[in-house]
Image: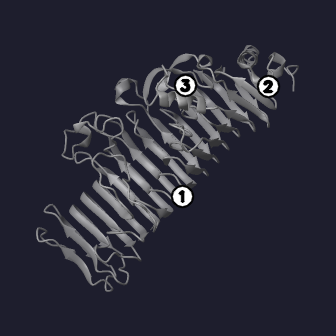
Amino acid sequence: MTSANKTMFNVLDYGAAGDGQTLDTVALQAAIEACSQAGGGTVYVPAGQYVTGSLFLKSHITLYLDAGAALLGSQNTADYPPVENRWEGVSRKTHAPLIGGDDLTHIAVIGRGTVDGRGAFWWKLHREHTLDYPRPRLISFSRCANVIIEGITCTNSPSWTIHPYACNNVTVDKVTIKNPANSPNTDGVNPESCSNVHIANCHIDVGDDCITIKSGTEEDGRDRLLPCENITITNCTMVHGHGGVVIGSEMSGDVRNVTIANCVFVGTDRGIRLKSRRERGGVVEDIRVTNVIMTDVMCPFIMNLYYGCGAWSTDKIADRSPWPVNEGTPRFRRVHFSDITARDVRYAAAFLYGLPEMPVEEITFSNVDISMALDAEPGVPAMAPNLEPMRRAGFWAANVRGLRFHNVTVTDQLGPALMVADAADVEINGFTTPTPSADAPVIQMRNVDGAFVHGCQAAQRTEVFLRVEGAQTKDIVLSGNHLKRAAQAASVGKEVEGIANSE
């Protein structure tokens, strides 16, 4: 392929050496400029190793990396000029990404080649605290429309790997992302304040979260925030990393309409993780997760409105008493999980922790099967202040409203399979464990206002199926359960007025 084809611009024709030694930034950028001046087309990178600093795409350009082609990130910070960009939800100067562009349309980075950020150079500077600006992302586009990233391999990113910000109609398909497990902040794909994002058929193995959905923080000014919405994630495998799919904690501009389907998580610290805290504000709503397999995770499901990172010592973040509801009060609602299996779980089956002034709302678990790792060591399931370590705990939920369980099984847990506290409007249908603990009920409720327990079975060796306690507990109904194998169907604390039991 040569530039004789007016829509194809071979970087070799513009002086690129591709020898793994020569700095090819000027030649690669010259090919991009020539393509742009011709009205658009394809910048073709044939097999070879091209050392480069930051490259800036233009509208109507496809950067095509052929099989055997590798872009190698320069090891000189001067080759990544400071630009106005985003980092951790705030607008600020950062080093320019290896591949980037602002305010563009119809752009693509595709092929069977590799983008290697050679990030060890940057990770060292980061750990030594010697950088003037945040590290480059590997690929980052801002305020762009109709973006495709397809087929390539991304590796050794200096920080976040693929980061579209305020973009519309973004597709990330058949991409392999590989960053070392100990590399700092090397998230896989982080759409921030984007609309209509499609992430599919990817393999992601990174040193931080595999996929994170963000929409900025209160520090950037609420009038400048944009939502992240209409996101589909499907047919992906995610390995290692701190989370499989994460929402937040930068979610002040709202996150809505997210589907996650047909994915496998292996060895991610957490599975599906939602996190925020007081002062962030914003709403996370209408999230659906289905057909997911998880193996060797610390905790499959987390919703944490006490996220402590960056604010561990702040009284307002850690205070368990209610605060006034205002624009800084975050909200999680309408989140539904179905057809999910998690094996070798270590800390807890789930950790749901709303605020007393803003419970997490309308949460459903349907057809969920959790089993614990027998060799698990204790640890805290979520980054919240003053948490006690957990080990092989069941579902744990506090400050929740509208919680639903349908056909849920927990195996090899220690203690209750389900603990619900400070909750209202709870339905439990077909919840069971084949391994009840001798010293704990299957289900424990404390200060629950309104619960309907039905369609459940007690396994052999069940001591107590349901224990209710707390002065605020009322309107608890058991009906249509098979609890004859339990030594005691229900245990009621003296402070509880009673429960309706039609067993």
Percent of width and height locating residue 425? 27, 60
State whether residue 405 is above or below residue 130. below
Q: Quick one: SS at disc 3?
A: strand
Badges 1 and 3: C-beta atoms under 8 Å apart?
no
- Image check: 150 left or right of 83? right
Residue drawn at x 20%, y 76% as measured from the top left: 491
Q: Which mark is residue 253?
A: none
| Residue bearing mark 3 | 142
Q: Which residue position holds label 2? A: 18
Determine whether the residue tagged by mark 2 lies in a helix, strand or loop.
loop
For the C terminus, give its image quadrant: bottom left
Q: Amino acid at mark 1?
A: Val
The three-letter amino acid code for the residue at tag 3 is Ser
In the figure, residue 458 lies in which quadrant? bottom left
* Residue 8 appears in view: no
User: Where does residue 152 sit, x and y in percent of width and height?
Assistant: 70, 38
Left or right: residue 36 versus residue 503 is right
Residue under label 1: 292
- Mark 1 Cα-neighbour bin, 10 Å: few <14, some 14–19, many ≥20: many
* Residue 24 seen in the current view: yes
Residue 474 appears in which quarter of the rendering? bottom left
The kind of residue tagged 2 is: Gly
In the rendered view, would you say 241 is above or below 113? below
Q: CA distance from mark 1 to mark 2?
A: 42 Å
Tag 1 secondary structure: strand
Give the quadrant of the N terminus: top right
Q: Mark 1 or 2, which is nearer the eye?
A: 2
**Position in image of residue 31 (x %, y %):** 76, 18
Disc 3 crowd rating (10 Å Cα; few below 14, some 14-19, many 20+) is many
| Nearer to the camera, 173 or 232 | 173
